[in-house]
Image (cartoon, coloured by chain):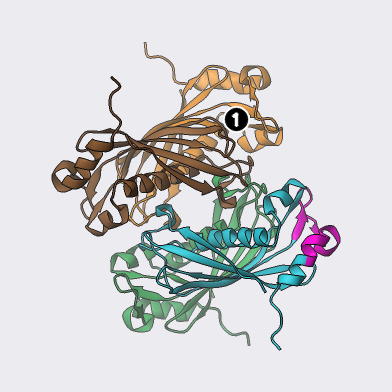
Chain colours: A brown, B orange, C green, D cyan
């Protein structure tokens, strides 16, 4: 199991009138973490899209534990929570710069053809990604 | 059980380079549905905030079924999925203008003091809201 | 000269920690006004894009007079400030529900080929739009 | 004259269905540049807000030269274009990673009391900021 780590400075634009980061913006941070995770195992999501494949989100589950604030930097930890050859589930933990856990969550993705949005088997169409996902995904504990 | 219905025209700003609505923006639409739901049972979230109470999101679960697109109008159905005097869970279904189900999901909320972010019991601090939530929430099926 | 009018309820997501609408979000509202303006003269921007033409922004000038707030509804007035067969300049005025002027501004647009981003003459490629823009644009005062 | 430089990786969330960065998002990048500029001359905007002062935008002027894209990193150059003791005008130039100029622009700001939104003279209320702004602002060419 590989955990990718990336830092993001909270943007003013990401706050709302509660004085904290607006809840939908954590999904954007998770995407940044995901991109980093993919890079660390040797791939590029931008390049995948150039081949005519998209990887839309099919499910998100987010638990908000503690609000992140402007003026802080947050750390996004991302890993492959689950993978079955078709669906990928990424896991996330976001902490603020005092080490407080702000968010835990998962997002589930498939691959689809950019024109038709028809699902594509990752195992079949992207064998190198498939191998890497099998290798780096979270393993069942002994 | 009361289901509030509201329509939203998809904004260009809400799309991404997949040519469909960016997944995080559905959370904004759910919030619009929630605001409408609250209005329909006789309250105003904006007014609640003016009394020094916030209602942050503690959990979201979103299932993305079908992409919404620019040029379409979507319909947001919102109801009270669950309520226990402290936590409120709203349920959502979003359909496009051809009746296709784009999203189903839930979001969970608590009430907190705006200054301290300490949880407040809705039953105790907002008895009128409490009564309405009890009345309009989804009832167990017979 | 035709002035299109459209109303928008301020979204919570559009606020920032100043407790007012974040300045970049007015550009989104201007776009909504622009879309309405185009509809009122008989066209659809979504349909234009389907023919392989985009109309990117080349310049914006925004004057922020008074902050819009959550809980308010704003009115967007949009007109064709200038048009020369190639460039269109839209004018905007946004007022809150007490009639206070929140924003005045302009945005300038061209038409480009969706694949190459090369400029296209509106007069030549979209003669019907051209005629309408000539007809409805702001006329020099006598 | 001091020019602050900062890099930003384009986020997927920042694109729209044109396949390029949505025009309003450049304002967010300018804000990141501004924050960096302020840090480089020894101050913190987040800290200023904690003293009960806000610095809202009163005007933006943006020229869009070339579209930035997902998969790229952009460089934001920010400087103090003008300053008169009350109003600050920041200047911006944003380039993509091939050195192409994507955007040039300015934004104008004042300082206001967080509660009343009444203007505050920077020279009077923030003498240290005043001195720095006088020192680092763009000087008239000889």
Q: Is residue B39 above or below residue D33?
A: above
Horizontal arrangement in the rendering, residue C115 relative to residue A94 (left or right)? left
> Is label 1 in a helix, a strand or a loop?
loop
The residue at the point 29 percent across, 64 percent down is C50
Snapshot quadrant of residue A66: top right
Coordinates of residue C27 in the picture (x, y in percent): 54, 61
Specify whether residue B92 is in view. no
Q: Is residue D116 or residue D62 the one in the foreground?
A: D62
Residue at far top of view: B142
The residue at the point 62 percent across, 35 percent down is B44
Coordinates of residue C100 in the picture (x, y in percent): 70, 58
Q: Quadrant of the C terminus of chain A?
A: top left
Please report the bounds of the magenta region as a residue range: D111-131
Specify whether residue D19 is in view. yes
Q: Quadrant of the N terminus of chain A?
A: top left
The residue at the point 45 percent across, 61 percent down is D22
Is-magenta flag for residue C44? no
- The residue under label 1 is B42
- Would you call the spot at circle 1 few (<14 residues within 10 Å), some (14-19), or many (20 or more)? few
Coordinates of residue C118 in the picture (x, y in percent): 34, 78
Q: Is residue A24 or residue B92 the one in the foreground?
A: A24
Snapshot quadrant of residue A119: top left
Q: Chain for mark 1?
A: B
Q: Is residue D128 above or below residue C11?
A: below
Coordinates of residue D76 in the picture (x, y in percent): 53, 66
Horizontal arrangement in the rendering, residue C44 relative to residue D86 (left or right)? left
């Amino acid at each position: 199991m590989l955990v990718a780590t990336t830092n993001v400075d909270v943007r003013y634009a990401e706050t709302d009138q509660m004085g904290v980061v607006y809840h939908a913006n954590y999904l954007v941070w998770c995407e940044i973490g995901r991109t980093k995770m993919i890079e660390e195992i040797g791939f590029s999501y931008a390049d995948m899209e150039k081949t005519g494949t998209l990887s839309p989100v099919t499910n998100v589950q987010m638990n908000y534990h503690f609000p992140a604030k402007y003026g802080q930097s947050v750390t996004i930890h991302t890993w492959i929570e689950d993978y079955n050859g078709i669906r990928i589930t990424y896991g996330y933990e976001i902490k603020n710069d005092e080490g407080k856990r702000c968010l835990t969550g998962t997002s589930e993705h498939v691959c689809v053809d950019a024109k038709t949005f028809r699902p594509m088997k990752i195992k079949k169409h992207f064998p190198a990604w498939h191998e890497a996902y099998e290798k780096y995904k979270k393993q069942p504990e002994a």
